[in-house]
Amino acid sequence: QVQVVESGGGLVQPGGSLRLSCVASGSILSVYYMGWYRQAPGKQRDLVAEINNVGSTNYADSVKGRFTIARDNAKNTVYLQMNSLKPEDTAVYYCQVVATPTQSGGRPSPYWGQGTQVTVSS
């Protein structure tokens, strides 16, 4: 009922930039939260940045000052602007959406996208 789709990943050289997009669609009553997570090979999936409906944000220490999360609530879309990319940023980036479906009795639940690959390499 709720679909989450990420886009914008790719290959970039160290110091470069990328902007990721995530769109939540389907039978959504409301979206409360959107966040970006990443998972590198052999590692845990970690929070990168998150934002709630009123614009409060939180960032992992490793990306503060380099990444910016923003959202368009009207379009149920969240963006991650990634600047000054480092090889350590290489990972699959996942979008998480906490949303209430339109189904009767629906409660806020997390939904995940399939991820988009970001590779930072020379």
Image (cartoon, grey):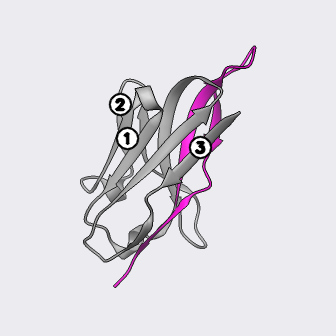
- Marks 2 and 1 in Cβ contact (< 8 Å): yes
**Residue labelled with disc 3:** 4
Q: Which residue is mark 1?
A: 58
The residue positioned 25% from the left and 66% from the top of the image is 84
Mark 3 vs mark 1: give the one in front: 3
Give me the residue at 52% from left, 52% from top.
6
Q: Amino acid at mark 1?
A: Asn
Q: Mark 3 and 2 residues: CB-CB less than 8 Å, in contact? A: no
Secondary structure of the residue carrying tag 2 is loop
Q: Which residue is mark 2?
A: 56
Label 1: element kind: strand
Question: Where residue 24 sits in the image (x, y, percent)?
Answer: 55, 37
C-alpha span from label 2 to label 1: 7 Å
Is residue 21 rendered magenta in the image? Answer: no
Front residue of 72/32: it is 72
Vertical placement of residue 79 versus 119, above or below: above
Residue situated in front as seen by the camera: 55 or 26: 26
For residue 24, side relative to residue 120 (left or right) = right
Give percent across and percent down for residue 74: 42, 26
